[in-house]
Amino acid sequence: MAVVELSKVGKQYPGSDDLAVKDFNLVTEDGEFVVLVGPSGCGKTTTMRMIAGLEEHTQGAIKIGGRDVTGVAPKDRDIAMVFQSYALYPHMTVRDNMAFSLKLKKYDKADIKKRVDEAAEVLGITALLDRKPRALSGGQRQRVALGRAIVRQPQVFLMDEPLSNLDAKLRVDMRAEIVKLHRKLGVTTFYVTHDQTEAMTMGQRIAVMKDGIVQQIDSPNNLYEKPANEFVAGFIGTPSMNFVDANISDNRLSGQDFGLALDEPRREAVAGRGRVRVGIRPEHLHLATGDDRTCRMYGKVEVVEPLGSLTMIQAKVGERTLTAQIEPHQQVSMGDHVTLTCAPDKLYLFDPESGDALI
Ligand code: ATP
């Protein structure tokens, strides 16, 4: 186990004018599970490869277990990697695949056997040890790939989209398995995904990246409750947050076909401003049922999606299409005119130019 420290870490690939990663700052806890998440090309893999030593960092410093690893070869960093392609050796049994790196390092036979047996036990693949990879399912192969990393008992695990070759159901199961495994082994882990649900369910802390820059590093709850900016707010949560621009006057927000009340903290947050970007999560936007007219959005239903325990609708409010969550018993059809509402304390507010959160 080890603390990993990234101080102003950056990467400029040769021949490129832009930085693929810029000013990445993070100090992990010992044994923490950190997820890097963001859209394609935001620099997740580059960051992992720099920690692994497969790619040199061109700015800043990386420390693993207190040791500056600049110039230290990947094999000497005491890390183990699990990638999207499991890259198992097809002609070797599961046992030999798992033992391979230990044999290279000339561990003694009894120690190798003990480590492989223990890892297989933890992963529930003891019965598969004599099989070849072609006789395994996708999930079982993924377990073997994890096993190969575990036997090395590294200070840090680096996992780059390890589940993306699995089907949706298996991915959900394996997510839980990896989290359990992490709890059991307590090894500091970096995990890359572009899937925000995966990030939210697995990470103790999550670094949300965009264009090579970390937008926010926080717990799943804080990312959801207190996003630092519009990008994070829109990236975290499914369906995505709705955004509308509003004018501010007389402590109210208004725009085409809507008027929303501001509570005290939000009034203070927008004091002196004429306009603001409002964010409303679909799960906070509902059909108005009572007489309270302080928060109203008037829309026309374009899409109705019954999902069983709840129903999602999309309604056109002014020029915007907003997603709202309604109860399954509320009968709504395409083309209906509906009145939507949201509690004032659930409104997110952003600077329309910078996108920074105001509250
Ligand atoms: P994805 O989710 O698609 O894997 P990512 O977030 O992992 O994306 P990176 O692969 O780290 O992103 O890429 C970050 C940026 O660096 C991209 O603009 C990419 O084109 C660029 N890049 C990656 N590898 C190289 C390379 N070897 N040479 C030059 N540019 C590169």
Image: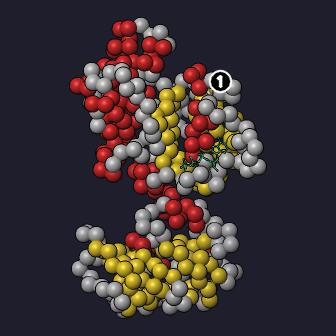
The quarter in which the C terminus is drawn is bottom right
Please, is residue 14 above or below residue 219 in the view? above
Q: How is the image coloured?
A: secondary structure
| 342 or 159: nearer the viewer | 159
Along the horizontal axis of the image, is 202 left or right of 18? left
Identify which amino acid the numbered label 1 is placed on: Val
Residue occupying image coordinates x 45% and y 40%: 84
| 123 or 265: nearer the viewer | 123
Q: Position of residue 306 (x, y in %)?
A: 28, 74
Q: Is residue 188 visible?
A: no
Q: Position of residue 196 (x, y in %)?
A: 46, 55
Residue occupying image coordinates x 59% and y 61%: 228
Please, is residue 129 above or below residue 33 in the view? above
What element does badge 1 sit on?
loop
Q: Quadrant of residue 54?
A: top right
Q: Which residue is mark 1?
A: 72
Q: Is residue 152 visible?
A: yes
